[in-house]
Every structure is written in C-alpha cells, then in structure tokens.
Amino acid sequence: MINGIPINGIQSTGAESKLVSSKPVELSVDLRRCEVLNASDPGSLAAVLQGGGELSSDCDEQLLITVAFTTPVKLFSISVKAPANAPSELHLFSNRTSMAFEDAEGMPPTQTIALTSTHVAGTPVPVQYVKFQNVSTLSIFIPSNQEETDVTTLHQLRFDGHPIATTNMSELKKMG
C-alpha cells in the first residue's frame, strides 16, 4: 500500500499504512550514559531530559551535552524549553562520543540549528532527517545564548523520532 492506495488491487492488512503514517514519538534516553560539560550542576541534566528542571552553564555561556538513546533512532525533531538566556543555536553531532569543547569548535557539525524565541518555547524544531537515520548518541554544542550573557539555561530537551528495530544478539538461539 502506498499513500493509502492498494498496490495491484491487493488489499492491505493495514500494518503497512500504520507504519508509513505513524507519527514520531518521544524517544527514550539512557540517562546513565548522558553527560554535560561546563554545567553548574551536572546532575540537573537528568531532570532536563525527563521533562523539567534547570541546567545552567558554569564558567561561560557554552554547554556540551551528550545524549545517549536506549536504542538507535531515526531523529525527526528536537524541542527546547528555556528562559530568556536560552541557547541561540545548537550544533548537532551524530554518533560522536567523548567530545570536548575543542572537538565541538573544530569539527563541522552534522547540522546547526538557529533558535528563535518561538523555538525555545517548546516548539519542535525539525532536523535534517536524512542525516539522523541511525543515531545512538547525539552531542549538542551550545556556543552562546540569546541574551549574550555569561550563563545559558535550559529547562527541557525533548527528542522525537522512531526507534530502529534491532535484534538483541544475546536472545538468539541456535537452531537445527
């Protein structure tokens, strides 16, 4: 079935159309593998990723957040909630682990997203979907904030997309 139209007159069971038309869902994050650099309280990252808290930068306006998903995902959008000193842009790095600020400033990001006051009110911001098809970790570099102050603050980060169906190799059994 393509766009709800049966192919060659064969009636669909509905599973195909359900898969094609399914909407993105909030993705599960593995909090144990998430980290943040230059935060005044690194422990507050978990609250921000779970729907509400306050994560503020420490020494300057920059933050470097690494988010690990429970399974590989197809990422569609990112939602940010923050006050006036919200991030002005996000530099996204797909599947980069153990990044430092020098790496984030020296490497080209997978995508850069400029944020407006509408975006930081929780409106989902689409990512370039083709570049985020198989994401296990997402590193987010925040170089500055909208108020151009020394502290950048986040209240919520949310990720929408689809988990990729994977096979757990430990569950496979020898046949035959």
Image: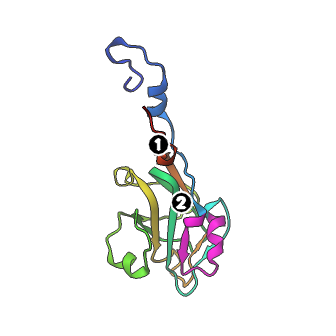
Mark drawn on residue 156: none
- Residue 30 lies left or right of residue 74; in this view the side is right
Disc 1 vs disc 2: which is toward the camera? Answer: 1
User: What x and y, as percent, mark residue 145?
Assistant: 51, 75
Calculate the distance from the C-alpha at mark 1 to the C-alpha at mark 2. 33 Å
Q: Which residues are magenta?
A: 32-48
Query: For residue 11, what is the image quadrant?
Result: top left
> As displayed, is residue 172 above or below residue 5?
below
Which residue carries the number 2 mark? 118
Nearer the observer, 36 or 76: 36
The numbered mark, 1 or 2, whose residue comes first in the sequence reads 2
| Viewport quadrant of the C terminus | top left
Q: Position of residue 116 (x, y in %)?
A: 49, 64
Residue holding disc 1: 165
- For label 2, the crowd category at 10 Å Cα-Cα, with few meaning under 14, some 14 to 19 and many 20 or more, is few
Q: Position of residue 44 (x, y in %)?
A: 65, 72
Residue 70 visible in the current orientation = yes
Binning the other alpha carbons within 10 Å of mark 1 as few (below 14), some (14 to 19) or many (20 upward) gives: few
Residue drawn 45% across the image and 38% down it: 174
| Vertical side of 163 occupied by 131: above or below | below
Instruction: Please name the amino acid that badge 2 sits on.
Output: Thr
